Image (cartoon, rainbow, N blue to C red):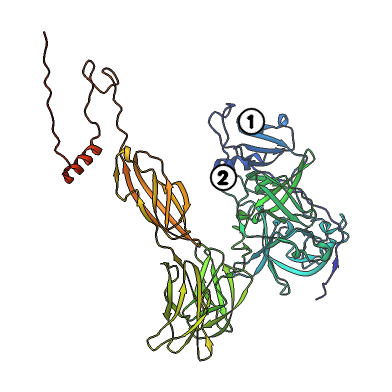
């Protein structure tokens, strides 16, 4: 389609709107006390902010991340008069920033031209209009395509029809600053809602502190069926190709501006510019109308009005006005969520990632088709020419639905839906095959000791089962529904897949991954459950195992050593120590392991004897204790002698003669 181009020439003037409000600042305790703090949010803050805007020189009031109230003025702080001066002096958390000029709506309302779009009066198509920037693609309350922009671009509703402009003719695309290169291309939209300032395009209100209805927003119904609205924002790098959609940032959410966070705007005059959110939850006089929103240091200029303001992939504002502070840019954006709440149900279009399919292209009867998508949203699936059906996507982003119940080739298309927002479609094909045969032994995940001599399973009677992988063989399913093949599998890891063929149709595949592991090593010492005197504490772990197997030993979880089985035996030194112990001996062959655990305990070492007195184990002045502190070895020895009948132990009592 060839664009219908219309050249727009500069001309016209901007009417000044004088704002006159009345009211009084809400008092705070000890307002004359320099330590008093002004409210930074809520009804009291809003009431104070809107009342301050009625004072000469005050252009905006907002809150920063440090919990301060920031007052933007065009007059020096010491020149503030009346209530504004008292408010600043009476609160310790108020900061004054002097800007170079009042906030000016960044629209070329005095130019018969366009800026992303040109809004004009359909009854006077050759008259003046608003040259502005599209903010975000949107949806009407009925789910029809729309766009949102700034309310002041509509001339208080007079400019009710809009047309897109040629990107290369806009200033951001290389056009002349005087807009002499601006050309109209496609018809865009009809105005559905517009508000600049208070309801009914009034200057704004100050009587109700809870009233946030002073805003700057317009909603347009897209009427050109040849246009496709995308949930994306251009970065203006492809304007020379006249296709701004070739380089974009997707809009994935709508939110509230985060103070001190990075922020970006896109507009037809200064293009793609970034900066920082300075203050939020504030109010500004934008060309004489109150607007609720936030302050940034992003560069903007006339014609950028209505442009997208976003943080990351989150839409947060509509460009409303701009000025400078000491020559540096200051931009005010209308709070997007607040602005949309007055449009009667218009919402920003969101970008949703297309779903992905995670199941294989071949699925057996009774199997499932699975995938992932945006968590908590709805998957809409269409099978061939059939009616769409919905599948919930769980909180982890997973979805699943059963495969068709009959063997065949099937084509599907799936999208993710969130309200009026839909992802791009993901087409995919699935071959539904007969059910795969089943493994009964070894089953998937089994660990078999020493060897496997047979692989068996179940299937369709008469089907030919084909094994692939670490075992290649065939078997026929018998009348009892079972099949088996003989194998000779030693110690190692294995993966075997199986399909079955019946009447020329091959089934889906099943897999059994299993391992043949060595026998557990034999531990000769220490003895399981052994109780040792310290003098008899084990000084080595010993045992037998598979020739050349690797042996590793841990003691109470700590590495105690390793060795290799030689001549059928193994030995790892241990340190004699008292305590309760868990000894784990692991035998490894071909990367497969098996373990034996032995628990034992060693008594504490006996106390050493000494002379009479302190530290000897006897009371002061007494003879040394000559009794046995640990009789276990002696008891064991005596018991052995008694059992063997080796000797008769005689105890001779010695008498002592006293000599005078």
Q: Is residue 12 above or below residue 487?
A: above
Q: CA distance from mark 1 to mark 2?
A: 20 Å
**Element under disc 2:** loop
Alpha-carbon neighbours of circle 2 within 10 Å: few (<14), some, or many (≥20)? some
Q: Is residue 254 above or below residue 515?
A: above
Q: Is residue 362 left or right of residue 454?
A: right
Picture disc at residue 209: 2
- Residue farthest along the top direction in this orientation: 660
How many residues crowd around disc 1 within 10 Å: few (fewer than 14), some, or many (20 or more)? few
Residue 559 pos. (x, y %): 46, 46
Q: Quadrant of residue 353?
A: bottom right
The mark total stands at: 2
On the image, which quarter does residue 518 sit in?
bottom left
Whether residue 466 is visible, yes or no, is: no
Which circle marks residue 141 in the picture?
A: none
Q: Quadrant of the N terminus?
A: bottom right
171 or 395, nearer to the observer? 395
Q: Earlier in the sequence, mark 1 or mark 2?
A: 1
Residue 448 place in picture, x, y as percent: 41, 67
User: In the rendered image of this protein, does residue 526 appear above or below residue 187?
Assistant: above
Q: State the image coordinates of residue 350 (x, y, percent, origin top left).
A: 63, 63
x%, y% of residue 152? 72, 55
Secondary structure found at label 1: helix
Q: Nearer the viewer, residue 261 or 656?
A: 656
Which quadrant is the C terminus positioned in? top left
Residue linked to disc 1: 86
């Amino acid at each position: 389609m060839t664009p219908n181009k219309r050249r727009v020439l500069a001309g016209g003037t901007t009417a000044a709107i004088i704002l006159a409000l009345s009211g009084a600042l809400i008092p705070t305790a000890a307002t004359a006390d320099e330590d008093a703090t002004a409210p930074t949010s809520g009804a009291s803050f809003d009431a104070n902010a809107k009342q301050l805007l009625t004072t000469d020189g005050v252009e905006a009031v907002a809150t920063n991340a440090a919990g301060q109230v920031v007052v933007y003025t065009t007059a020096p702080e010491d020149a503030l008069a009346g209530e504004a001066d008292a408010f600043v002096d009476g609160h310790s958390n108020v900061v004054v920033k002097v800007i170079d000029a009042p906030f000016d709506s960044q629209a070329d309302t005095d130019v018969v031209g366009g800026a992303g779009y040109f809004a004009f009066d359909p009854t006077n198509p050759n008259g003046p209009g608003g040259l502005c920037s599209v903010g975000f693609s949107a949806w009407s309350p009925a789910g029809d395509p729309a766009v949102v922009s700034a309310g002041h671009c509509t001339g208080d509703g007079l400019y009710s029809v809009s047309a897109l402009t040629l990107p290369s003719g806009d200033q951001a695309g290389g056009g002349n600053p005087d807009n002499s290169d601006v050309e109209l291309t496609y018809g865009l939209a009809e105005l559905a809602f517009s508000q600049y300032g208070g309801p009914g395009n009034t200057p704004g209100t100050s009587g109700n502190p809870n009233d946030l209805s002073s805003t700057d927003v317009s909603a347009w119904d897209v009427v050109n069926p040849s246009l496709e609205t995308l949930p994306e924002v251009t970065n203006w790098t492809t304007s020379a190709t006249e296709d701004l959609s070739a380089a974009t940032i997707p809009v994935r959410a709508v939110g509230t501006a985060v103070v001190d966070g990075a922020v970006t705007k896109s507009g037809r005059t200064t293009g793609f510019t970034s900066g920082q959110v300075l203050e939020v939850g504030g109010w500004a006089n934008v060309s004489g109308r109150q607007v609720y929103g936030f302050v940034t240091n992003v560069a903007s200029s006339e014609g950028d009005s209505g442009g997208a303001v976003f943080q990351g992939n989150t839409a947060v504002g509509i460009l409303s006005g701009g000025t400078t502070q000491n020559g540096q840019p200051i931009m005010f954006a209308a709070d997007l969520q607040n602005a949309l709440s007055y449009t009667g149900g218009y919402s920003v279009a969101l970008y949703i990632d297309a779903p992905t399919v995670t199941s294989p292209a071949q699925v057996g009867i009774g199997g499932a088709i699975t995938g992932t998508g945006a968590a908590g949203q709805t998957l809409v699936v269409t099978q061939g020419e059939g009616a769409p059906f919905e599948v919930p996507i769980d909180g982890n982003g997973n979805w699943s639905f059963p495969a068709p119940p009959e063997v065949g080739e099937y084509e599907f298309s799936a999208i993710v839906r969130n309200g009026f927002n839909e992802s791009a479609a993901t087409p995919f094909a699935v071959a539904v095959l007969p059910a795969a045969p089943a493994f009964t032994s070894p089953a998937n995940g089994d660990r078999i000791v020493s060897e496997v001599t047979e692989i068996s399973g179940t299937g369709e009677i008469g089907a030919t089962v084909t094994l692939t992988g670490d075992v290649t063989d065939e078997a026929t399913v018998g009348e009892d529904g079972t099949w088996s093949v003989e194998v000779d599998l030693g110690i190692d890891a294995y993966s075997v897949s199986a399909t079955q063929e019946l009447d020329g149709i091959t089934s889906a595949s099943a897999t059994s991954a299993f391992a043949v592991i060595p026998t557990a090593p034999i531990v000769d010492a220490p003895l399981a459950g052994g109780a040792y005197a310290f003098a008899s504490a084990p000084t080595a772990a010993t045992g037998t195992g598979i020739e050349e197997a690797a042996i590793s030993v841990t003691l109470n979880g700590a590495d105690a050593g390793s060795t290799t089985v030689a001549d059928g035996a193994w030995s790892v030194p241990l340190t004699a120590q008292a305590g309760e112990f868990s000894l784990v001996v692991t035998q490894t062959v071909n990367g497969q392991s098996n373990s034996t655990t032995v628990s034992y305990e060693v008594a504490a070492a006996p106390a050493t004897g000494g002379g009479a007195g302190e530290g000897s184990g006897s009371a002061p002045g007494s003879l040394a204790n000559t009794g046995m502190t640990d009789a276990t070895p002696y008891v064991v020895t005596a018991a052995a002698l008694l059992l063997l009948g080796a000797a008769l132990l005689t105890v001779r009592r010695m008498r002592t003669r006293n000599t005078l």
